[in-house]
């Protein structure tokens, strides 16, 4: 007899802890079941021990909403990454184009420029100083060429030997050092080139 009560008690406690689901359809009819309700029906899980109820539909909606937010965030991050890569690729191409213009100028004016007067800054192998300003690499390449031309136009420089970004440069004000064959040096600022 005690054994039978023990078995019945354990079965009842297993059934009681299994959970009860309260299903309410669109017409307001309520049914209690031992398994979750079908889709489209208000689905509440009742805890018979504590008497509390959990709306499973709300939990599912919250989880779906969180997943959608996470997906949207991932897509936004992916878009931002693509835009950054496109911007970097454009900056790199612009720098290559400006450098090609400088090399063309040097090649066509050997009396005014030494062959290595304006060496190309390779975007993947930038000197430390240039790397600090790498987001303006195309501007640097263009302004190096303009600095050389400005030094030649002064009449004090017969031939340009080297043009480099100078350590005096800041983010908003680049400075270029032009070495001439006459031993004359020019420090030309971005602002002077803009005039």
Image (cartoon, grey):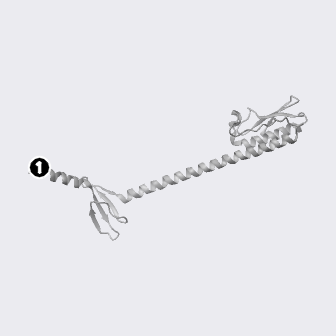
Q: Is 109 positioned to the left or the right of 19 in the image?
A: right
Assess disc 1: are there few (<14), some (14-19) or many (≥20) residues with their C-alpha within 10 Å of its C-alpha.
few
Q: With 105 as the anchor, is 60 left or right in this view?
A: left
State the image coordinates of residue 48 (x, y, percent, origin top left): 24, 55
Residue found farthest to the bottom: 27
The quadrant the C terminus occupies is top right
Using the image as rendered, state which of residue 164 and residue 51 is in the foreground. Answer: 164
Q: Residue at x 18, y 51 (%)?
A: 10
Residue 184, compared with residue 60, is above or below; it is above
Q: Position of residue 43 (x, y in %)?
A: 33, 61
Is 137 left or right of 21, judged from the image as shown? right
Question: Image quarter for residue 118?
Answer: top right
Q: Quadrant of residue 66?
A: bottom left
Residue shown at the point (87%, 42%) measured from the top left: 108
Q: Secondary structure at mark 1?
A: helix
**How far across and down, in percent of the image, does residue 3 sit?**
11, 49
Would you place residue 179 above or below residue 86 in this image?
above
**Label 1: which residue?**
3
**Which of the 4 quarters of the picture holds residue 27?**
bottom left
């Amino acid at each position: 007899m005690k054994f039978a009560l023990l078995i019945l008690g354990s079965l009842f406690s297993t059934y009681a802890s299994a959970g009860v689901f309260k299903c309410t359809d669109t017409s307001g009819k309520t049914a209690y079941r031992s398994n979750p309700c079908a889709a489209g029906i208000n689905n509440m899980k009742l805890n018979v021990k504590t008497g509390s109820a959990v709306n499973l539909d709300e939990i599912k909606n919250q989880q779906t909403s969180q997943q959608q937010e996470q997906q949207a965030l991932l897509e936004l991050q992916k878009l931002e990454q693509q835009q950054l890569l496109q911007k970097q690729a454009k900056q790199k191409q612009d720098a290559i184009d400006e450098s090609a213009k400088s090399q063309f100028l040097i090649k066509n004016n050997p009396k005014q420029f030494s062959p290595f007067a304006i060496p190309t800054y390779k975007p993947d192998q930038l000197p430390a100083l240039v790397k600090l300003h790498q987001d303006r690499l195309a501007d640097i390449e263009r302004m190096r060429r303009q600095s050389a031309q400005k030094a030649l136009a002064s009449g004090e420089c017969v031939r340009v030997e080297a043009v480099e970004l100078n350590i005096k440069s800041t983010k908003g004000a680049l400075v270029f050092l032009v070495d001439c064959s006459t031993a004359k040096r020019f420090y030309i600022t971005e602002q002077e080139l803009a005039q």
